[in-house]
Amino acid sequence: MEICDFTLHRPTTAAEAVALAFELGAGARFLAGGTDLLVDLKQRRLAATHLIALDGIGELKGITRNGDTLEVGALSTMSDLGDSDAVREHAPGLAQSAMSMGMVQIRNRATIGGNFSAAVPCADTPPICIAAGASVRILGKGGVRTVAAETFFVGPRQTTMQPGELLTAILWPVLRAKSGASYQRFARRRYASLAVAGVAAQLSLDGARIGKARMALASVAPTPLFVPAVSKILDGEKPGAALFAKAARAAADAARPITDMRGSAAYRRDLVETLAMRALEQALANAGQRP
């Protein structure tokens, strides 16, 4: 299929891009890496008469530490995240999830801002960001606002962003000592395949006990899904196989999967339980304690 005719715009600042989006109205869409948008346009899932290219906006690029927060520019590609020393040190779960996505050609183009803004249920980076308690920075006509990653998604391909608003950065709390994270996914093929199910977990240790734990799921609900029941089970408890099995079962119970060509709902629930157990064990090991 061919993409319909459109006018390409190349703003040089985020404010200019937002002003253009409001001026051009419903026919305008932001173009970052294009790995989702261009496919959607070809398959007529979306329509656009104006594309606002973001690649010339320097302020949307780069990964910097600002105190206890790692600021990840929206134009950071999956390869950028995997290659970044700062991400590997302070947000290793994010690096892991980014490098699990697609093949190298996709990772070199796909951006974290696009992965969030597309809001597809199988996106790989949002769950680990939710598990980490990250937030997103959004620029609109009225200024800048910040939204928790766990409340950013409201439905399939739907977010809290209003028309014309632009996601400019992911704000990630720097991983503290005695903390660990993990993202586990299952796909029908190792590369270039969407996740049938995914589980992200992060926990911090307080002595011999779990101080705080968070978990989020991918591909098993209309949106990336935060599971507060897991936190209630794990927080304040001594880690162990029986406790993790209970938390994994709670994650599977919280899932709201569908049946499609990649797997049945029952199969996806089973996957969530298995992946949740793996994610918790790996997060614990990454926190410096044997599971």
Image (spheres, grey):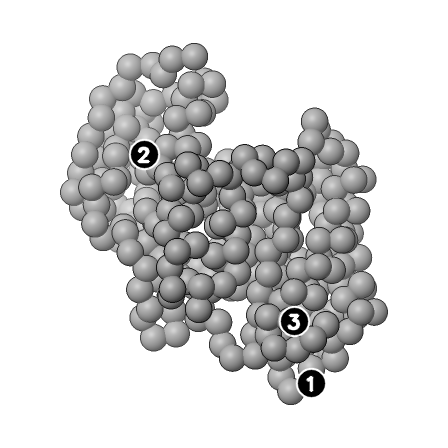
Whether residue 130 is visible to the viewer of this picture, yes or no, is: no
Decide which of 93, 60 is in the foreground and name it. 93
Residue in the image at 31% along x and 70% along y: 66
| Residue 83, disc | none
Name the residue at the right extreme.
242
1 or 2: tag closer to the N-terminus? 2
The residue pinned by badge 2 equals 31
Quarter occupied by residue 131: bottom right
Q: Residues within 10 Å of mark 1 (few under 14, many from 20)?
A: few
Tell whether 13 sits left or right of 207: left
Say few, some or many: other residues with alpha carbon within 10 Å of mark 3 (under 14 / 14 to 19 / 20 or more): many
Residue 290 place in picture, x, y as percent:
69, 75
Q: Which residue is mark 3?
A: 284
Q: Is residue 249 visible?
A: yes
Tell me the quadrant of the picture where the C terminus can be found: bottom right
**Residue designated by label 1:** 208
Q: Quadrant of residue 146?
A: bottom left
Residue 46: percent from left, percent from top:
43, 23
Q: Residue at x 36, y 16 (%)?
A: 3
Helix, strand or loop at label 3? It is helix
Q: Marks 3 and 1, Cα distance to the nearest angstrom?
A: 11 Å
Q: Earlier in the sequence, mark 3 or mark 2?
A: 2
* Residue type, numbered disc 2: Leu
What is the CA distance from the residue labelled 3 to the residue labelled 2?
38 Å
Q: Is residue 95 left or right of residue 257?
A: left
Which kind of residue does numbered mark 1 sit on?
Answer: Ala
Residue in the foreground of this view, choosing between 183 and 99: 99
Name the residue type under label 3.
Answer: Leu
Image location (x, y in percent) of residue 276? 71, 57
